[in-house]
Image (tube, rainbow, N blue to C red):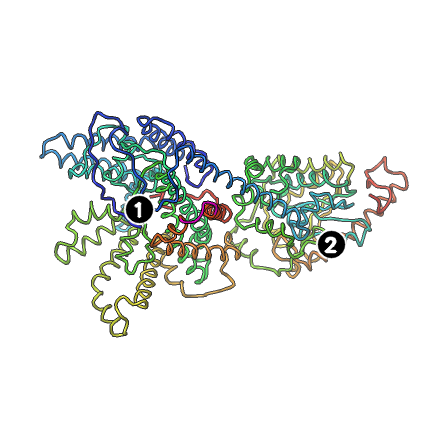
Amino acid sequence: MSQSATAQAAPQSVDSSPGERVASTAPESAQSSHPKLTAFESVARLCGFFVILVALIFLTNAMITSGLRRIRTSEVGALNQVMQGKVNAQIVITGSSRALAHFDPRLLEQATGYTAYNIGRNGSQTDMQVAFLRAYLEHNQKPKIVIHSLDAFSFVTSREVFEQVQYTPYLSDPALYSALWKVNPDIWKSRDLPLYGYVVEDMNFAWTQGVRGFFGWSPRQDFFLGFNPRSKEWSEDFERFRELRPHGVEFAIEKAGIQDVEDLITLCRQNGIQLIFVYSPEYREVQKITTNRDAIFSEFRELSAQYQVPFWDYSDWSHAGDRSYFQNSQHLNARGAEAFSNDLAGQLRSYISSSEARSDAGQSAARPTLPFAQKGSN
Amino acid sequence: MLFNSLEFACFFPIVVAVYFLLPQRWRVYLLLAASCYFYMAFIPVYILILAVTILIDYVAGIYLERVQESARKPLLLASIVSTCCVLFIFKYFGFFTGSFVATAGFFGLHLSRPAVSIILPIGLSFHTFQSLSYVIEVYRRRQRAEKNFIVYATYVMFFPQLVAGPIERPQNLLHQFWEHHAFNLEDVAEGLKRMAWGFFKKLVIADRLALYVNDVYSAPRNCNGLQLTIATFFFAYQIYCDFSGYSDIAIGTARVLGFRLMENFDTPYHSLSVSEFWHRWHISLSTWFKDYLYIPLGGSRVSQGRHLLNLMITFTVSGLWHGANWTYVVWGGLNGGYLICGLYTRPWRDRLFRAAGIEDGSAVRKLTMLSSTFVLTCVAWIVFRARNIGDAIYVFTHLASGWNVHGITTEQFWLRQFPVAFASILALEIGQYLDRGKHLKTTVARLPISARWAIYATCVMTVIMFGIYKKMQFIYFQF
């Protein structure tokens, strides 16, 4: 393959212009795969190949999108249920991965008798969570209650769309698209350029799920009514995290972040949905190293009081100091999620009962109550 | 502008279309304008540095032909020194002042480093060396001075090889700007195929392996021996695929436009000795150092001691060319050491092989030599890739310790990436093996057009679907 650069200097004259001296280079290969073609035929042949290639790219893109939309199980399946309007639950849980891994809708259903679904999104901030709730409302019947899981980082706005590829099959959805566009103005590339969202924005072959999904494959079911329990035991992540941050950790309280929470409140009010804020358990030690925790919780309480949204704080949960209930400092494991969901279900049942009692007693004008009259109806 | 960017995907077809539509006399202007645009996509103002280098060597070239014999050498030296000054200021100023301050500190003199932070212009070492090559060749009367400034500027700035080579000699490239390149489907098709192969190397192999290598080498002390070993093996393929991938894209891009650039790699990991490796790795740079440094120093036609010194000087300077860091200097020195050892242990090795009953040219002997050359190269790559000498020593000393099969993943590189990484390396080796006798090309060329197109489309789709598109720069851009 190697050729040394030992070509002799071509004869040159000073006066002529480039291209006027030497004959054109001849094709090197005697065994040419291209018979003598005119320039037009050559261009036509090249164009023909590229047309086929582009068609192939569009077809592959369509196949992946269709395949991903067909999946019924796991994370993709849960998203499909929401975007295809197949959820229609009466209680909807929103939030980040903490919502996703902590709130078991099956236990809430058992306790309250209402249908429930968890639409928490991994790696999402409040802005994305609101956007996803908006998309949910667009495609499903309105829930009666939205339980919003708060985090210490609830007032931090998104810097990027986490695992953007998961939304790619639904970028034609205006509500979802406009929310994603606010975080990532380049999202149009994923929507408008075929395969871009699947191969450029993702390095982990999510597209293979789409291809397999197209042929009827579905991943193992690990999402239950949108809830994704984590079977892992306590890892050493927290120790490493604490070592790396000897002066603790601080979460920004951004004005835009507060506005996002207010947007959530407004969205629920406009749709007549009862909103409940829940701060689900976190490992007790992490509370000590969050340097501005008081300021964050003060903001939660202020918003709760100002908009009369119940705020249930599980910071002092009875198992908050027990590592056997946690996967890491921020996430409960399956055992912890079950214990917490049972506790929450009890509180929710009491809340619904008292709200209904107030509603029955005609006190609805005095205090906000649950926007439904009959249990189990939708 | 990166080859692996959307911008280039738009830029290149436009340049090609306009290039072939324009009358020949205007094409060189188009190439110069396109090259300026290509370069200015990085840091626009740095084109002025390039302009200075071009101007110095253009004028020097013309005067080298005009001045008296006695003035030629001083003129050449003036040209080389001024061109190298630009390189020194932007690339080595911080390194040398830092080293000087550190040395002074060692002797108790506490000096502070000058508070100057200079961003290295992309590909500076490449176009500087290409410019130097021109002036030296004119001085040696092996190349006529180029009188047309536009043509000379395009020779230095030709966008396919502007930022990472191949470092062309004027004899090979300059005259091509004067030639008429008619639109030729053979050239276009061959060029596009070469580009596709380059993109496969860069996007599918190099950038995927980079995820692992970067994770491990950014914090080697957090990794176990198995991770360090895998990362070192991966880096060998990453740097090869990154750089040879760039060369393939550059050669292919130029070929589409009708230009022939020199080959820069010849399956270097198939070498049976370190010496052979350096004949097959970054050929344009190796031959540059051979022609303009090693041979002028006396090469091998001197005393034995001087020969060794020449080798060490050449490889140390080559190391320094790669970057202003002691790791590169040590890497260069290590390779020089390999060569010297290889030279002087050859009789012993021959005897050893004979004693073991391994015949000269036998498969076992070849395999042994190929493996040992690869391992030696990988050892040198550790120094090359490490952030500093301390990290390199840590990697050396921990390669064999604490292997944990369950702990081989990293933050960016999950388990599912491994099959793709190893399969792509295997595909590379198979592709290179089949390409050796050009049998593959001949066989494919004989197929009917539908079968050929199906093969090409499958290859392109493979690159698209398995590529990594994190806008990772080519490693050699920094040199």
Chain of the residue displaying label 2:
A
- Mark 1: which secondary structure? loop
Residue A135, visible in the rendered structure: yes
| Amino acid on which disc 1 is placed | Glu
User: Which residue corresponds to the image point at 49% horizontal and 57% vertical from the top-left?
Assistant: B418
B148 vs B430: above or below = above
Tell me whether marks 2 and 1 sit on the same chain. no
Chain of the residue displaying label 1:
B
Q: Nearer the viewer, mark 2 or mark 1?
A: 1
Residue under label 2, please give it. Answer: A341
A49 vs B68: above or below = below
- Classify the position of the N terminus of chain B by image quarter: top left
Instruction: Tell me if B40 is positioned left or right of B64 in this view.
Output: right
- Residue range in magenta is B446-450
Q: Is residue B252 magenta?
A: no
Alpha carbon distance from label 2 to label 1: 66 Å
Could you classify mark 2 by the number of other residues whose Cα lies within 10 Å: few (under 14), some (14-19), or many (20 or more)? many
Of B56 and A55, which appears nearest the observer? Answer: A55
Residue under label 1, please give it. Answer: B263
Of B459 and B265, which appears nearest the observer? Answer: B459
